[in-house]
Image (cartoon, helix red, strand yellow):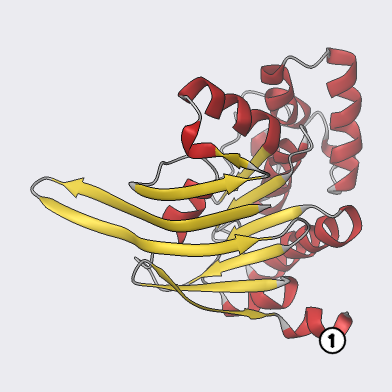
Amino acid sequence: MIEVLDVTRVYQMGLVEVQALRGVRCSIQQGEFVGIMGPSGSGKSTLLHILGLLDSPTSGTVTIDGTDVGLLKEQEKSEFRLNHLGYVFQDYALVPELSVRENVVLPAMARGAPPDTYLKESEEILRQVGLGHRIDHRQYELSGGEQQRVAIARALINRPGILFADEPCANLDSNTSRTILNLFRELNEKYGQTIIMVTHEEWHEEFMCRVLYMKDGLIDGEKACKMRENKN
C-alpha cells in the first residue's frame, strides 16, 4: 500500500542544514498496524508526516496505493489527504465550541458529503468508538481518553484507507492508553484498517503487527510483534 524509496528530508535552520531523514526505504502492506519507534530526533515523526502528505521529502519517492504522491500538485495533495488518509494527533485538535458530533463530521463536510449521509455515519462511528452516549457533549465535558476517541472518530468519518497516529497516547495515563490501543487493534483486526502509529513506548508493541525502528534518520531494524505472531 505504501512504498518509500530513498527518502531524505533536510531542514534549513539559519545557516545550518539538519538532515532529519537520510535515505529511508520501507514498505507497508494494506491491513497492517505498523508502529514507528525510536529515540527523540530519530526522524520518526518526520517520516510519518511525509507518509501522510503533511510534509514533502527533499528527495526520494513515496508511492501510496499506486500513486506517486510527489508528482501531485498542492490541490491534488489536499484532495488525496481528504479522500484517502486520516490523522490522529496527541493534542486531539478538537474545536471546543462544537459538539462531539459536529467535530466528527468536519472532514465529511469538507469533502462535500450530503448531511443525511454524514450525520448517520457519525452516529455509527461514535458508537463504534464507544461514544454513542456522548454525541451532543462539548470538549470540556470529556476526559482525555474520550477526547482522543472523538479525534479517532473524526479521522474515520471519510473511511480512509490509511490512518496515521502521531503519539496518540502521549497525554494519557497507561489505563486510558490501553483503551485507545485496544480500539486501534479492533479497527485493524475487525475492519482491516491500515494504521501507522508513532510511539516511544515499547509496551505498545503488543498491539501492533510490526514495528519499524528508527535511528539517526534511517530505518535501523524491524520486527513482527510476538503477540500477533502467536495469535496468528
Res. 95 image quadrant:
top right
Amino acid under label 1?
A: Asn
User: In the figure, is residue 216 to the left or right of 52?
Assistant: left
Residue drawn at the location 38% of the way across and 68% of the way down = 42
Other-residue count near label 1 (Cα within 10 Å), few / some / many at <14 / 14–19 / ≥20: few
Q: Nearer the viewer, residue 50 or 154?
A: 50
Q: Nearer the viewer, residue 65 or 135?
A: 65
Residue drawn at the location 59% of the way across and 43% of the way down = 92
Residue drawn at the location 78% of the way across and 28% of the way down = 101
The image position of residue 44, as x and y in percent, is: 45, 62
Secondary structure at badge 1 equals helix
Q: Nearer the viewer, residue 13 or 128?
A: 13
Residue topped by disc 1: 230
Q: Is residue 200 visible?
A: yes
> On screen, 214 above or below 136?
below
User: In the figure, is residue 126 to the left or right of 112?
Assistant: right
Q: Is residue 133 visible?
A: no
> On screen, 205 above or below 46?
below
Residue drawn at the location 61% of the way across and 73% of the way down = 211
The image position of residue 229, as x and y in percent, is: 80, 83
